[in-house]
Amino acid sequence: MKRAIFPGTFDPFTVGHYSIVMRGLTFFDEIIIGIGLNQAKKTLFSVEKRLDLITQAFKEEPRVKIASYNSLTVDFAKSVDADYILRGLRSVGDFEYERTVADANRKLTGIETVILFTEAEYSYISSTVARDLISYGKDISAFLPPNVKI
Ligand code: ADP
């Protein structure tokens, strides 16, 4: 069984994240979406709300599981018996960071990171822009996965 984790902050989970998971399911048997709580980042959405939005997105998809974690990402991967980390890449801005973390994780534990390029139509979608829109009272439904309501 090929199992991957898809770690992130997901503040909030967007259609860009959704697309990466759905594409990941074409070659992974199971994907565990891990909401990382250990970062010093202050989030707009509570962990309960973030879990709720992701649960809505995947309620018809039994091969996707959702959890939160408070440890190093590789330790979370080991704890759920996953050999892969799935990540998405939008731009060269994402590239250096993703490569450094992927290299460190592989050297430390042998866990491979699989990176998918974003679909062009989602390359402008980010949690940061979604939060900015919310702060100005704008609707973000176009940023959310299908069938997800804030
Ligand atoms: P983190 O704080 O770990 O970067 P995020 O929630 O911002 O967590 O993102 C999780 C993963 O999803 C990262 O690999 C990020 O590059 C990817 N991602 C975010 N938005 C998109 C998008 N629109 N298309 C593809 N991948 C994306």
Image (cartoon, rainbow, N blue to C red):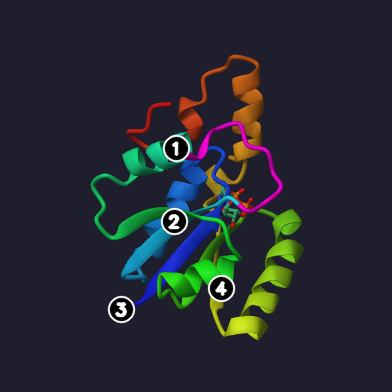
The disc placed on residue 38 is none
Mark 2–mark 3 distance (CA, rounded to whole Å):
17 Å
The disc placed on residue 48 is 1
Residue underneath mark 4: 113
Residue 145 in sight here: no
The question of residue 43 being in magenta is answered with yes
In the picture as drawn, the residue positioned furthest to the front comes out as: 70
x, y percent for residue 90:
63, 53
Disc 3 marks which amino acid? Met
Mark 1–mark 2 distance (CA, rounded to whole Å):
14 Å
Disc 2 marks which amino acid? Ile
Label 4 secondary element: strand
Residue 110 in sight here: yes
Relative horizontal placement of residue 53, taking residue 139 as reference (left or right):
left
Q: Earlier in the sequence, mark 3 or mark 4?
A: 3
Q: Is mark 2 within 8 Å of ligand 1?
A: no
Q: Residues within 10 Å of mark 3 (few under 14, many from 20)?
A: few
Residue underneath mark 3: 1
| Residue at 39 percent of width and 53 percent of height | 66
Mark 3–mark 4 distance (CA, rounded to whole Å):
17 Å
The disc placed on residue 33 is 2
x, y percent for residue 70:
56, 56
Q: Residues within 10 Å of mark 4 (few under 14, many from 20)?
A: many
